[in-house]
Image (spheres, rainbow, N blue to C red):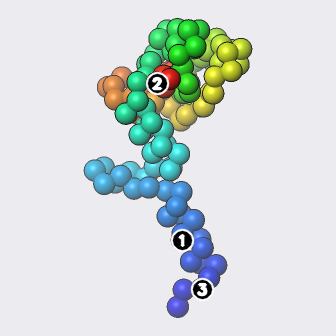
């Protein structure tokens, strides 16, 4: 018989982890939301395009890869702070590129305002 504590532990795992139907890889629920957000929205991909989007005020949310060179990403983070743009750090450049629908890693991406 399944006790209440064990059931809560199982449900917590179920809520926060999602298994990909194609490759079988486990994703954090936040990663799934990120991928869906970037896949179906207008976006700027790459350091230069993301910086331009923030400067022009058209960026709603900026994503920066955690493994990207800080010399590249620091200016974007500063721009986000000065312009009041939401900034989110994500796992890796490879994951961010995949979430954007491109075959190469990306250090930064921005979801554009409608």
Q: Residues within 10 Å of mark 1 (few under 14, many from 20)?
A: few
Rendered image: mark on residue 114: 2
Q: From mark 3 to mark 1, how far is it between C-alphas?
A: 11 Å
Q: From mark 2 to mark 3, how far is it between C-alphas?
A: 48 Å
Residue shown at the point (31%, 54%) measured from the top left: 21
Task: Please give the residue where the numbered disc 3 appears in the rendered image.
Answer: 3
Q: Nearer the viewer, mark 2 or mark 1?
A: 2
**In the picture shown, does residue 76 fall above or below 66?**
above
Task: Please give the residue where the numbered disc 1 appears in the rendered image.
Answer: 10
Residue shown at the point (40%, 24%) measured from the top left: 42
Q: Earlier in the sequence, mark 3 or mark 1?
A: 3
Left or right placement of residue 97 versus residue 6 in this view: left
x%, y% of residue 64? 56, 25
Element type where label 2 sits in the image: loop
Is residue 72 among the parts visible in the rendering?
no
Q: Earlier in the sequence, mark 2 or mark 1?
A: 1
Left or right placement of residue 80 versus residue 27 in this view: right
Out of 54 and 101, give the one closest to the viewer.
Answer: 54
């Amino acid at each position: 018989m399944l006790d209440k504590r064990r059931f809560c532990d199982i449900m917590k795992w179920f809520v926060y982890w999602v298994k990909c139907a194609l490759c079988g890889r486990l994703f954090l629920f936040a990663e799934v939301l990120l991928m869906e957000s970037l896949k179906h929205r207008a976006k700027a991909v790459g350091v230069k395009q993301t910086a331009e989007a923030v400067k022009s005020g058209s960026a709603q949310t900026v994503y920066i890869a955690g493994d990207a060179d800080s010399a590249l990403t620091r200016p974007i983070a500063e721009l986000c702070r000065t312009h009041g743009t939401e900034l989110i750090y994500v796992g890796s450049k490879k994951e961010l590129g995949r979430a954007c629908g491109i075959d190469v890693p990306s250090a930064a991406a921005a979801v554009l305002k409608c």
